[in-house]
Amino acid sequence: MATRRRGQRKGRAKRRRQGPRRFRKAARAVAALLLLGSVALGFSTARYLLQSDALVRARFEGATFRVPSRVLAAPTILYPGIDWRHIDLRGALARLGYRPAPSAQALAPGRYHWSDTKVSIHRRAFEHPSRAAPARQVQLELAGERIERLHDAPSGRELSVFFLEPEQIGSYYGPAHEQRELVKLDEVPAHLVEAVIAVEDQRFLTHAGLDPPRILGALFANLRSGEIEQGGSTLTQQLAKNFFLTPERTFRRKVQEAVMALIIEARYSKLRILETYLNEIYFGQRGGVAIHGVGEAARLHFGKRAQDLGLHESALLAAIIQSPNGLSPHRRPEAAQQRRDLVLQLMHEQGRISDIALARALSQPLQVAKVTPEPREARYFLDALRRQLPEFYDQASLSSEGLRLYSTLDLRLQRLASRALREELERLEGEHPALRPQTPDGEALQGCLIALRPQTGEVLALVGGRDYATNQYDHCTQARRSTGSVFKTFVYVAALEPREGRRPAAAAGGVKTLADWLDDSKLVVPLRRGNWEPRNFDREFHGRVPLRVALEKSYNVATARLGQEVGIERVADVARRLGITSPLPVVPSLAIGAADLSPLEVARAYATLANGGIRPRIRTFEDIVDPRGETVERQAIDFERVLDAGTAYLAVSLLEGVVERGTAASLRRRGIEGPLAGKTGTSNDEKDAWFVGFMPELVVAVWVGFDTPRSLGLASSRVALPIWARFVREATGGVVPGAFPRPRTVIERQVHPQTGALALAGCPARRSELFVIGAEPAHTCPDWGAAPAQSVPPPPERRPGLLRDLFDDWFGG
Amino acid sequence: MVATRNAGRVSDRRPAAARCGARARVTASAATPTRLALALLLLTALLAGCLGPGGASSGVGGERGAPALRIGDFAGHGGPVRRAATRLVLQGLDADARAQPDAALAHYQRALQVDPENPFAWLALARHEVFNNLPTGGSARRALAFLDKAEAAFGGLAKAPWRLVTPHFEGLRGVALLASGRAAEARPHQLVASRATVWADGRLDAAELR
C-alpha cells in the first residue's frame, strides 16, 4: 500500500516535472506554427498586394478606358428653298437631343423655338478638324413647308446655308457594350465635381482611400435596420470595385476593394482618381448600351457636353449615381428630382454653393433631352463601312480607340430605304403566299437597296437585308447574284461607244447609233457543247426592231445578237470600265446577263453613266478623327473618266426610254415626275429581281430574291421596281429635280423612223434622235447616197474663247 | 516609310497614338522635294508658254486686261441650291487662301452634297487638287477628272461664262498634264493660260478665283 502510494507520488512528481516541459514544447510548436503562418501570411499578403498593385498600374497606366468608335451621319444641311418637312427637321432636332423652348428669347445651345412662321435654333458647337463650327443661333423664316430665309439671329445677317451637327448612327462596341465620352477634369464644370463629392464622398480630398467614420456610420445604420441599406464606400473604393471586382456584397470582396482603394490612393493623385472616376461611373442604359462617365451621361440626359452643364444638371447627374436606373430622370422624374434637390441641399450644407445658387438651382424644373436609341437601320452600313477600312482598323481597335468616323450616310434616306424594303417585302408576301417561308423556320424573302450620289460616289443609304437581327449577310455588298437584263445596258453602251475605223462614214461613231434597228429573229450561236439559242421572255421573236425598243422591251435575242456583233470581250471591257469588278464569263450569254454581280457594283456602273462617263470611287466615309482631333484617315472624292460623255448620255437617253415606254413604265404610274432612267432585270427562272434606276443626283439599285435561289414567279417590275418607286417617291417627294445634262458633243437630228436615215426635206416621216457629233447617219431620206455636207451643220464650238482664238491664230481658222 | 498620303488618305499601320503625331512630319518631309519639282515644272511651262509662238508679248485679243473670273460674281445666280453651294465654294476658297486646305476641301465637298453639279465647286476642287495635292503626291489623273467634271457642269449651264472660265481650265489642265509627264499635251494649254490675266503672273491664287 505504502509502496503504491510512493509510486503514485513519484508519478505525480514526474508528471509535475514533465508538465512544463510539454507546455514549453507545445508553446514552441505553436510559436513555430505561428511564425510559419505569419511568414506564409506575409508572403501571400505581399504577393496579393503586389498582384493588386500590378493590376492597378496596368489599368491606370495602360489604356484606362476602351472607348467605342462612333459613326456619324452626314449633317443635315439647311438653305433657303428647302422643304423642312421633307428633310424631317423636327425629327433631326429631336434625335440630336435639342429641346423645345417656350420662346425664342435667350435660347441656350441645344434649344429651339418653333412657331408657325419662324424657327429659332441655337446650334451647339461641334468639333471637327476641318469642319468645326461654333455654337450659333439662327432663325429660319418659314413659308408653309419651305424655309424662306435663314438669318444669323444676333446680327440679323442673311445666311445662304447652315449645318446642324451630324447625328450619331452607331458605334463599334466591344463585348461589354459600353459607351463613354472621355472628359478631362479641367473641362468639367467645378459644380459637377462638387456635386459628386458632396453626395458620394464628402471627405474625398482628405482621406487615404477609406473613410473610417463613414464606414462606422454605415455599419451602425445597417445594424439598426437589419439589412444593408447604406454603403460606406469612398469614390476610390467605388472605382476599385468597378474596375477590378464583381458587384457581390461579401466581406472578402469588401476587403479586396479596400486594399485596391489604398493602393490606388498611394499610387495616384486625387485629381487623377477623380477624373478616372468621372469617366468610369455607370449612368444607366441607352437601349442595350451601358452609359459610363459624365461626358456620355451629359449627352444622354441633357443632349449637351459635360462642360456646358448647369448647376441643377450637375446635381442631377450626381444624384443618379446611386441608382442610375431606379432614379432615371426619364422613367422616374419625381424620384430623380427629389434626389437632385437633396444633392443641392448637401452642397449647400457643406458650403459648396451659395444660398442664391441653391435657390436658383432648386427652382429649375427637371428638363432632360429625349432619349433616342441608336438607329437600328444603319447596321448593314456600319458593317460595310468597317469592311471598307484598312485592315488595321479591326474590331478590337474600333471598339477601343474612341475614333469618330464621319460617314456619308444620309440618315433620312436610310430610314426611308429601310422602311420601303421591309414594308414592300411584307406586302409582296401578303399578296403572293408562295413567297412566304414554306416552314415556320423556313427561309424568308430577302432584298437589299443601295443609294449612291453618282457625282461623288457617296453611299447615301444601304439596307443590306430585310432584318439585321436575323440575317447579317449584306446582300448589297457581299452577295453576287445573277443580274439578268440589268447587264444588257453594257451591251448597248459597247455598241454606241465610238470605235475608230469601224464605220468609215462616221469614224467617231460606234457599231450602232440610236437610230439603228436590230434583228430579233431566231439566233443560234454554236458553242463547243452544242448550240445556244436565246429566247425572249414572252417566248416570241419580234423580227426587226428599233434599237431603242430592243432595250426598252428588254428583248434577249436582239441583245444577244448585238453582243455577238459588238464582241463579248468588248462588252465585258465596257462593264469593267464602268465599275464592275466581279469576274465576268466571256460567253455569248453574258450579253443577256449571265453574270453574278453585287448590287453595289451594278449601282456603281450605272452611277458612271449618270455621271457622264466618269466613274466615281465608292465612299462610305469622309474622314476618321482620333480622340485628339487629328484626322487619321480620309476618303476624298476620286473618280476617273472611263467613257466619253456623249456615249454616256446616249445610254442615259436609252434608259430614260425604258422608264417612259418600256419594262419600267409603271414607275410613272407610281407618282414620280421628273428625269428618270433605269433598267429592270429578272434572272433565269425569275430567281432574282432587280431594278437599277437613277436621276441626275441619285442612283438606286434594288435586288430581291432568296438566299437559296428559288423562283419568285414574278417579273422584276412587280417585285423590285415597287420598292425602288416607293423609296424614290418618299425621298424626293415625288418630283425629281434637275435634268440629265446633255454634253456639247451630243446633237439632235431628224431621222426617218423606219430606216434611221437622216431626214431631209421630202422625207415622208421623221422623228428626233440623238447622236454623238460625227456619228450622224451617213445615208439620207430621200436617198442621196450620202448626207449632203450642208445638211449636217458643223459641230458647235466646244468651248469658245481663248482656246478657239488661239487655234484660229495658229491655223488661220 | 510607314505612313503614306495618297488620294487624300492617310494610311498608317501603327497604333493610333503613334499614328497621329507622325502624320504631319511624314507628309512635310516627303512633300518638299516634290513641291519644289512641281514648282519648277510649272515655272518652266509658263516660261515656255510665254516664249512660244504667239507668246505673252503678242497677247490674245481681248484677254489681256479682261476681267478675271470671280466666282463671287455668280454667288447670287441660280436657284437657292446653287446659291447655297456657291457660297460654300467661296468659303472654301477663303480657307484655301488662308492655307487651310483641309477646311477648304471640306467646304467643296459640302458644296457638292448640296449641289452635285455645281460647276464652281468642281473647278475649285480641281484647283485645290492641282495646287495643294499635286505637290504632295496627289493625283494628276484626279485633277484632270475634276476638270472634266467642271467642264461638263459648265456645259450644263444655259449661259456658261466660257471666256472667263477657259483660262482656268487651260492653266489647270496644263499643270496637271505636266505633272503626269505629258509635257507635249500640256504645252498648248499652258500657252493659252499664260495669255490670260489671271495666269499672266504664273499663279492662280484662291483669291483670284474668289
Image (cartoon, rainbow, N blue to C red):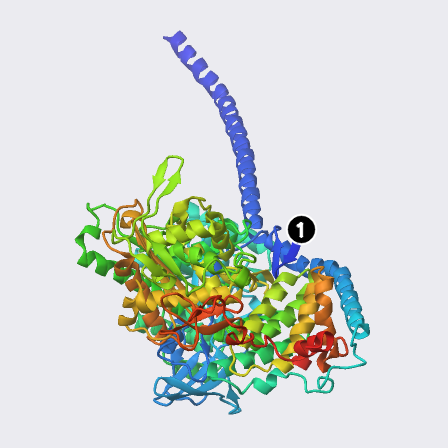
In front of the other: A742 or A422: A742
Image coordinates for residue A51, horizontal then vertical, percent: 55, 42
Residue found at the very far front of the displayed protein: A784
Residue A250 vertical position relative to residue A29 in the rendered view, above or below: below
Image coordinates for residue A658, horizontal then vertical, percent: 34, 65
Q: Is residue A260 visible?
A: yes
The residue drawn where x is 59% and y is 55% is B16
Q: Is residue A247 visible?
A: no
Name the residue type under label 1.
Val
Image coordinates for residue B33, horizontal then vertical, percent: 77, 60
Residue A153 vertical position relative to residue A746 in the rendered view, above or below: below
Residue found at the very far bottom of the displayed protein: A156
> Judging from the image, what secondary structure is the residue with disc 1 in?
loop
In front of the other: A341 or A600: A600
The total of numbered circles placed on residues is 1
Quarter of the figure with the N terminus of chain A: top left
In front of the other: A150 or A571: A571
Query: Label 1: how many residues lie within 10 Å, few (<14), some (14-19) or many (20+)?
Result: few
The residue drawn where x is 52% and y is 22% is A21
Image coordinates for residue B107, horizontal then vertical, percent: 57, 74
**Subunit bearing disc 1:** B
Q: Is residue A632 left or right of residue A489?
A: right
Quarter of the figure with the C terminus of chain A: bottom right
Q: Is residue A744 left or right of residue A460?
A: right
In front of the other: A766 or A603: A766
The residue carrying mark 1 is: B2
